[in-house]
Image (tube, rainbow, N blue to C red):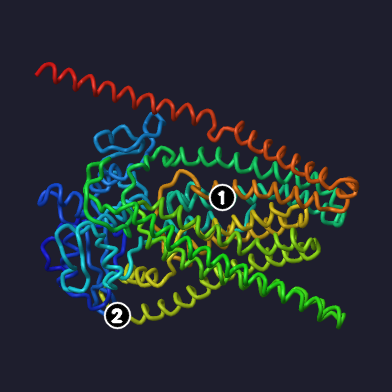
Amino acid sequence: MAESWPFLDTFEPNFRPLVVIELAKGTKEETIEWFTKRIVDKKANGGEYNMIFCAQLLVKPLVTENGDEHFYLVGASHLRLLLGAETVGLVKECTDNSMRTFTYSSRKTFKDFADDNHNFLTMAECQYIIKHELENLRAKDEKMIPGYPQAKLYPGKSIVRRLLTSGILVQIFPLHDREELKKLRHSWYGRVKVGYQPLDEIRCYFGETIALYFGFLEYFTFALIPMAVIGIPYYVFAWEDYDKYVMFATFNLLWSTVILEVWKRICAIMTYRWGTLLMKRQFEEPRPGFHGVLGINPVTGREEPVYSSIKRQIRIYLVSLPFVCLCLYFSLYVMMIYFDLEQWALDYHEVNESNFSSLMLFVPSIIYAIVIEIMNRIYRYAAEFLTSWENHRLESSYQNHLILKVLVFNFLNCFASLFYIAFVLFDMKLLRQSLATLLITSQILNQFAESLLPYWLQKRHKKRMKKRMCSLKTDTDLSLVEQVNLEKEMGTYFGTFDDYLELFLQFGYVSLFSCVYPLAAVFAVLNNITEIYSDALKMCRVYKRPFAEPTANIGVWQLAFETMSVISVVTNCILIGMSPQVNALFTDSKTDLILTVALVEHLLLAIKFIMAFVIPDKPRDIQIKLAKLEFESLEALKQQVRATDTYNSEK
């Protein structure tokens, strides 16, 4: 079928499949021909039109065991990938050990570059380039998808997005490199060891975003160890003496500031080495889900969809904001039901006074922890729908609005009951019990739902698929067909959002009420050690390989963690001020107590902000290298201006 189309005869003899496109079974031939033609068209046939609206990639149909051709392998020539690297602004190391944005014209100046070296770009970078080209396939003059009149198109609409929403395109995913993956698995989690993760190898295979998450997870785990070591004796020897927790809480607050500032420096070192610290993001392409009337970007001069910011603001403030407030109210309503259950369990225990009734005291907290996880996941889907409906132009803007919605709800949903117990009920015993139950239950549920269950399901599917493939008798390249069939059924990894959210909530449990439950850091360390191995397992064995995404930092999550550390100052100071031992010092005047607590809280906040200001975000050597590159760029611009002026004067 497809092999008779002349434009498919352009791929190189050494075709390397990088990305798989799965179309729905029974997709009309004219649709397949149109879509694949848009992927492989060359700009020589259409000039600027095809430079923007066609991808110039290579496509090869893959015949499955049933003779179907609804899978297509996508690759690109070495030249096309190098030009794509320049388009997306990849930064590579030069022969003088500096990091510079790659350009094809200066390719000889980059380290390890050679015309016959096809490993100059990592496989993850190549797949990122192909993803970028596919996502920027946009309709120009078409009114509909050929063969599907109901699938309307308009100028500027993302073709891939329309194919997905119409059910014509099932999925697009990058292929695993089985040999490289085997090596990575062995060095990453193949054996239990005490040491650092192979972050550079993770970055080369999965990209910077995922490598940065694992780097932060590892760093955060090591940073928790001092808190855990100090917290154990406080828990064992000074359980009810809250005045002895003053030093522990103070150390906690300073610790939270230092680790976040030091992380910025470590992050800068890693991302400079990977090149993403220098990548320019101000000319970020519109996200695939963005739609609008085709217009001209005033900055780049390129054609792209344009959507009114006023319409977007109306959607945000008149629809999304009221919906979020309604969800917050519902969360508080569920919290009050939880307290009714707590009172019922307490009354039951007072009447019966048995081992069973003692166990029943923990049941409401366990049920509430499970309900919290369910509500968080349901709300996440609603937040994603609303944020997509708001039609943000850039992926970064979309992510920021989504994270804000989810963080606000999750913070209230997870911590509102603890604040209520601490500052309304003034029940420190119930606060310790609830905090411990919520923390441990949420960790167990997350480990089961995110890693153990998906791994078990994937292992069952893999066994069935291998049995079916072994029974086939065909001349097809069974290894590639088997790989595609296995990977297409694997779960899709939707990014590091949930992973960072889990760490954010864990950071809240550890820091907000540290003077009440110092063992929180111990459970966090134990959880994170298993989290490193379980997350590595799910990345390599459970999920499809995700597309690499360059990033220079952990984004808005840095601000979220810093905000949590500020809130923790307030909560810990109030908790210490509420303790009987501290109250005994101010028997004559409660006003003096309040003023003293407020003074200490402001003093600690001042120390935090001073430390954040004093500790540079980037090490000195990185600052010098960045300044040097900026100076060289300005000098090059001056020379270009002089050359232009000289040329004009000679004319």
Location of residue 544 by image quarter = bottom left
Q: Left or right: where does residue 373 sit relative to residue 318? A: right
Image quadrant occupied by the N terminus: bottom left
The span from disc 2 to disc 1 (Cα, nearest Å) is: 56 Å
Location of residue 432 by image quarter = bottom right
The disc, 2 or 1, on the residue closer to the chain's N-terminal end is 2
Q: Residue at x 19, y 55 (%)?
A: 54
Dot 2 lies on which element?
Answer: loop
Dot 1 lies on which element?
Answer: helix
Amino acid type for the residue under numbered disc 2: Lys
Q: Residue at x 49, y 29 (%)?
A: 623
Q: Left or right: where does residue 276 sit relative to residue 260? A: left
Look at the image and tell me whether residue 451 can be seen: no
Q: Left or right: where does residue 562 sit relative to residue 549? A: right
Instruction: Give coordinates of residue 479: x percent, y percent.
Output: 34, 69
User: CB of mark 2 within 8 Å of CB of mark 1?
Assistant: no
The one of 506 and 403 positioned closer to us in this rendering: 403
Q: Is residue 173 above or below residue 241?
A: below
Q: Callout 1: few (<14), some (14-19), or many (20+) C-alpha neighbours within 10 Å?
A: some
Q: Which residue is mark 2?
A: 473
Q: Residue at x 78, y 49 (%)?
A: 230
Amino acid type for the residue under numbered disc 1: Ala
Look at the image and tell me whether residue 323 can be seen: yes
Instruction: Give coordinates of residue 27: x percent, y percent.
Output: 22, 75
Q: Which residue is mark 1?
A: 560
